[in-house]
Image (spheres, helix red, strand yellow):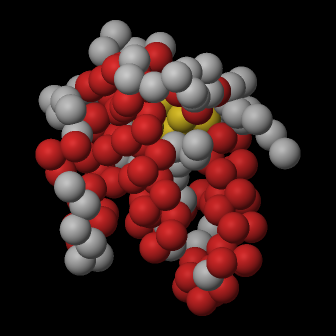
Amino acid sequence: MRLWSIHPRYLDAKGLVACWRESLLAQKVLLGETKGYRNHPQLVRFREQDDPLQAVGIYLEYIYIEAKSRGYNFDHSKIIKIEPRDKLAVTTGQLEYEWAHLRAKLRQRDPERLKQLKTLILKDLIPHPLFYVVEGPVESWEIVK
């Protein structure tokens, strides 16, 4: 499961579809509707919120918006809860880690997309709209490879 902190605009087609599916899975986990993934580290930042379903719902909403802008037909009705909320913090170290992780994935599955993003430098990287950036290391819940 990968719930990206970087803006979904940077994801290739496969990455965006995977993020949608994995975010829907995260929603199911938070609803208690699955047996697996209940202790997945990517869910920590959502579980720490007063309303985890609201947080993951907003996360999904922005994935949906990006998909719609690309002409994809994701089923919006699958998002359980969408209400305005305060943004969540994400560290510079987490964004840097994810940016490197995404570039490695793109090298393998979509070199053309990687070429389009080549000129983007880390300081200009936009986070997922649910997040605001704070200085800091990779998040403690991240499994660094």
In front here: 44 or 120? 44
- Give the residue at x 66% y 85%: 111
Q: x, y percentage for residue 99?
A: 65, 58
Q: Give the residue at x 30% y 63%.
A: 66
Residue 7 visible in the snapshot = no
> Which of 73 and 7 lies nearest the eye of the viewer?
73
Q: Nearer the viewer, residue 98 or 91?
A: 98
The picture places residue 62, in percent across and down from the top left corner, at 29, 50
Left or right of 129: which side holds 79?
Answer: left
Q: Quadrant of residue 132?
A: top left
Q: Is residue 74 above or below residue 88?
A: below
Residue 24 image position (x, y, % from top left): 37, 41
Q: Quadrant of the C terminus?
A: top right
In this view, the residue farthest toward the top is 50
Q: Is residue 78 visible?
A: yes
Instruction: Return the residue found at the far front.
Output: 35
In the rendered image, the vertical position of residue 6 relative to residue 35, given as above or below:
below
The image shows residue 10, relative to residue 110, as above or below, that is above
Number of marks: 0
Residue at the extreme right: 145
Q: Position of residue 19 (x, y in %)?
A: 46, 53
Residue at 51 percent of width and 39 percent of height: 133
